[in-house]
Amino acid sequence: MKITDYFFDVDYTLVDFGIGHEQALRTLGKKYPPAFVDHFAKVFLTFLEGLRVKDNNWSKVPGGREHFDSVMRLSRELAGRITQHVWSREIWACIARDETHAQLTPAECFDVASLYWESVIAHATVYPDVAPLYAHLASHNSRFHVFTSSDARLKWDAQNSTWIYESKFSNISKMKRVKLVQTEGVNITSVTLGDLDDKPSPLFYKRILDTASQAVGFSLNPQQCAFVGDSFESDVKIPLEQLRLGRGYWLCRGNGFREISESIRQIGTLGEVE
């Protein structure tokens, strides 16, 4: 069955987040202690590679499965009731603070995250294979959709000594990266942002198709939809199984094309999307 609708993750799929991230770390290094910034970077890498783990291979995760589980546990403890936003940079700043004994208040950890995101947005770029892919899909009358996790930005409520989550505030930096893709001439049919429901929640994946169907004016056939992203589990395997999608593309930039299963393909560039 012909694929008519393609759904793309944003960071590391359409947008080179890594460039922005590295520059953000250099920016933080000019203001905060080196040990603190290094540990903040380690927490980020642990979480990123932990989400990319396939076949229980934890070799690329700093500290392995044990450290990943520790980061997840600490994130949940520090975030309190906002447990779904365990990838919050505010929370990671708190973890780095606690484990390096940096003298930072929660409000200052918020400032760390704000400076980080400002730098990411200023330096992140769109991958060069995005525009040619869009032109190819458009020439075949296929639609281009975006689905992406929330940036999980939190605010510190000093009066109640707790972190709070506000959807509008949290999505500002993510929408700027979506708009960055649009500056390349990409017409995005629908955008679904993670919120109180996010990857890998079944509610989030259902909302992706519901949002897209509303945008096109009719119910999409999941068998004519394909998901593309850099996380094997949360971008490809889980939504493929839950939504019964027609195809999934696991993007591993720099690696070659191979078929993982009848419906899942590993690709090294977006040019290998069919």
Image (tube, helix red, strand yellow):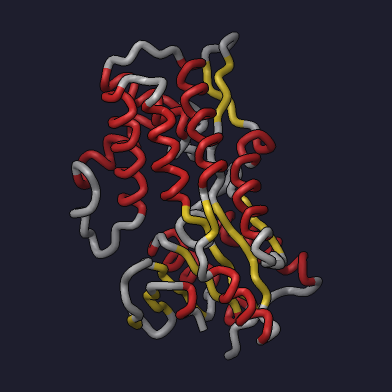
Position of residue 20 measured from the top left corner of the image (x, y, whole percent): 47, 45
Question: Can you name the residue that lies furthest to the bottom here?
Answer: 1
Residue at image position (32%, 44%) is: 45
Position of residue 164 measured from the top left corner of the image (x, y, whole percent): 58, 25
Q: In the visual, does 208 lie left or right of 257?
A: right
Can residue 232 be seen here? The reply is: yes
Residue at image position (53%, 23%) is: 163
Can residue 10 be seen here? The reply is: no
Q: In the visual, does 59 lie left or right of 16?
A: left
Identify the image quadrant of the N terminus.
bottom right
Q: In the visual, does 64 lie left or right of 134?
A: left
Residue at image position (28%, 15%) is: 101
Position of residue 43 measured from the top left corner of the image (x, y, whole percent): 32, 37
Q: Is residue 65 above or below residue 161?
A: below
Q: Is residue 190 above or below residue 104?
A: below
The total number of labels drawn is: 0
Residue at image position (51%, 22%) is: 111
Position of residue 239 measured from the top left corner of the image (x, y, whole percent): 50, 65
- The part of the image, by quadrant, that contains residue 141 is bottom right
